[in-house]
Image (cartoon, rainbow, N blue to C red):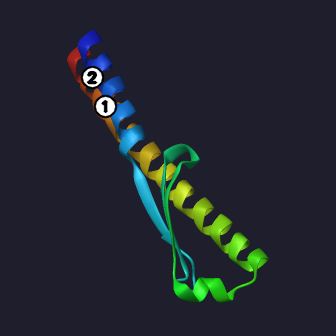
Amino acid sequence: MQGDMQNKIAETQRLAAEMTAEAISESGEVRVVAGAGGEVKEIDLRLSAFELSGVELGEMVAATSKAATAAADAALASAVRASLSDMFGAEREENR
């Protein structure tokens, strides 16, 4: 049981470090890849993004970054939930 718990913790840490999600602005000018916890890994701008004002572009990058990090956080939460469910489900079966 102790070893299983340590393996699940290590797996969760690995998932947290590797989890990424992508978001693209509605108009397609901004693409962001982010990790869980708000880490922005990539920002890609199409040429047409430079036709926007600084404020418009900033707002678009911020909103797209927020969407990407939210998606990565949700994916990580789902993966952790599934991992813990598997572990505790197996533990319940063993205790029957």
Cα distance between the residues tagged 1 and 2: 6 Å
Question: In the figure, residue 60 lies in which quadrant?
Answer: bottom right
Mark 2 Cα-neighbour bin, 10 Å: few <14, some 14–19, many ≥20: few
Point 54% across, 55% down: residue: 69
SS label for mark 1: helix
* Quadrant location of the C terminus in the rendered image: top left
Q: Please state if 90 lies on the left or on the right of 52 as rendered.
A: left
Residue sticking out furthest to the right: 55
Is residue 25 shown above or below 19?
below
Question: In which quadrant of the rendered image does the N terminus lie?
Answer: top left
- Amino acid type, residue under disc 2 in the picture: Asn
| Residue under pointer 1 | 11
Q: Residues within 10 Å of mark 1 (few under 14, many from 20)?
A: some
Asked whether the viewer can see residue 1, the reply is no
Up/down of 21 relative to 78, above or below = below
Is 94 in front, or is 59? 59
Q: Residue at x 27, y 22 (%)?
A: 7
* Position of residue 19 measured from the top left corner of the image (x, y, whole percent): 39, 48
Q: Secondary structure at mark 2?
A: helix
The residue to which callout 2 is attached is 7
Kindly indicate whether the residue at mark 2 contacts the one at mark 1 (C-beta within 8 angstroms).
yes
Is 3 positioned to the left or the right of 68 in the image?
A: left
The amino acid on which the numbered mark 1 sits, given as a three-letter code, is Glu
* Numbered mark located on residue 35 in the image: none
Report x, y in % for residue 74: 49, 51
